[in-house]
């Protein structure tokens, strides 16, 4: 951590951006980020100032990319540039723009999760809720050179998104069908059930949300 004039250490500052306009989702993300980051990191979660309450299609994702840059600049002008930024959406809208606009590390839920899964041997599957997101995540995987590592992209469906046991069953069936060695399960709406899904799941589950928080903190610490 950076040292203050009095010799004490200033906490590392992490900005977490919710590209949706839902304050309820922002509160959920902030709670997760604070839990993962621990007491030595000051977490500020901000909500997009325009766009969709919950992004569910390409149009919403395109608008969110602009909204992410807008709110990051506004929050930085108000409180100063953070030590790291996390885009809290499993699809990373605006990631390239933020990385170009800010000197600090900028990490997205999706890329962090996919790269973490690819660091282990064997194929892996990617699961979320929404066919449109599966298509966009497939494109992202191609952009970062991981397409050949992914066995499938699975939309779990609305019912499984609310029911951990059903979600576990859907993922297990797909993993058996495709030979996936692990699963990346992402989406802010799925955060409440992730721990329950992981319980008794016959393959490892990578939580891209917590993975991204850890990666952003590690990069910020290295930069300091």
Image (spheres, rainbow, N blue to C red):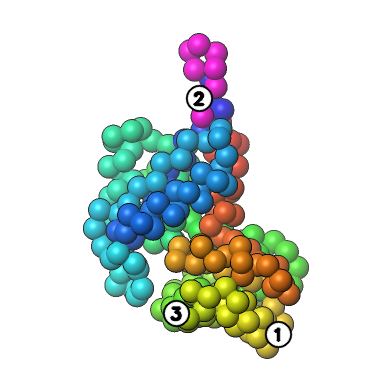
Which element type, helix, strand or loop, lies under badge 1? helix
Boundaries of the magenta span? 4-11
The quadrant in which the C terminus is found is: top right
> x, y percentage for residue 53?
30, 64
Q: What residue would you read off at disc 2?
A: 10
Q: Residue furthest right?
A: 121
In the image, is 149 to the left or to the right of 23? right
In the image, is 37 to the left or to the right of 87? right
Residue at 57% x, 77% y is 167
The mark nearer the N terminus, 2 or 3, is: 2
* Front of the two marks 2 and 3: 3
Q: How many marks?
A: 3
Give the distance between the C-alpha atoms of the residues marked 1 and 2, in whole angstroms: 48 Å
Give the distance between the C-alpha atoms of the residues marked 2 and 3, in whole angstroms: 43 Å
* Front of the two marks 3 and 1: 3
Residue at 26% x, 62% y is 51
Please rate how many residues cluster around mark 1, counting C-alpha atoms within 10 Å: few if below 14, some from 14 to 19, many from 20.
few
Residue at 56% x, 42% y is 37
Please rate how many residues cluster around mark 3, counting C-alpha atoms within 10 Å: few if below 14, some from 14 to 19, many from 20.
few
The quadrant in which the N terminus is found is: top right
**Looking at the image, residue 187 lies above or below residue 180:** above
Residue at 27% x, 42% y is 74
> x, y percentage for residue 165?
60, 77
**Is residue 8 rendered magenta in the image?**
yes
Q: What residue would you read off at disc 1?
A: 176
Q: Which mark is residue 78?
A: none
Q: Which mark is residue 158?
A: 3
């Amino acid at each position: 951590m950076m040292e203050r004039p009095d010799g004490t250490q200033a906490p590392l500052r992490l900005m977490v951006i919710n590209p949706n306009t839902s304050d309820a989702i922002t509160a959920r993300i902030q709670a997760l980020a604070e839990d993962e980051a621990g007491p030595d990191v000051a977490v500020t979660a901000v909500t997009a100032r325009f766009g969709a309450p919950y992004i569910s299609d390409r149009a919403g994702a395109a608008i969110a990319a602009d909204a992410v840059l807008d709110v990051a600049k506004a929050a930085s002008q108000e409180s100063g540039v953070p030590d790291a930024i996390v885009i809290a959406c499993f699809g990373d809208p605006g990631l390239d723009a933020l990385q170009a606009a800010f000197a600090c590390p900028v990490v997205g839920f999706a890329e962090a999760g996919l790269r973490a899964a690819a660091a282990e041997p064997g194929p892996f599957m990617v699961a979320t809720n929404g066919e449109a997101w599966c298509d966009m995540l497939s494109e992202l995987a191609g952009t970062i050179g991981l397409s050949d590592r992914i066995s499938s992209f699975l939309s779990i469906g609305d019912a499984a998104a609310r029911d951990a046991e059903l979600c576990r069953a859907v993922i297990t069936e797909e993993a058996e069908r495709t030979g996936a060695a692990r699963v990346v399960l992402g989406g802010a709406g799925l955060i409440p059930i992730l721990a329950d899904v992981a319980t008794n799941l016959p393959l490892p589950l990578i939580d891209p949300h917590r993975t991204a928080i850890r990666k952003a903190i590690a990069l910020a610490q290295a930069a300091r």
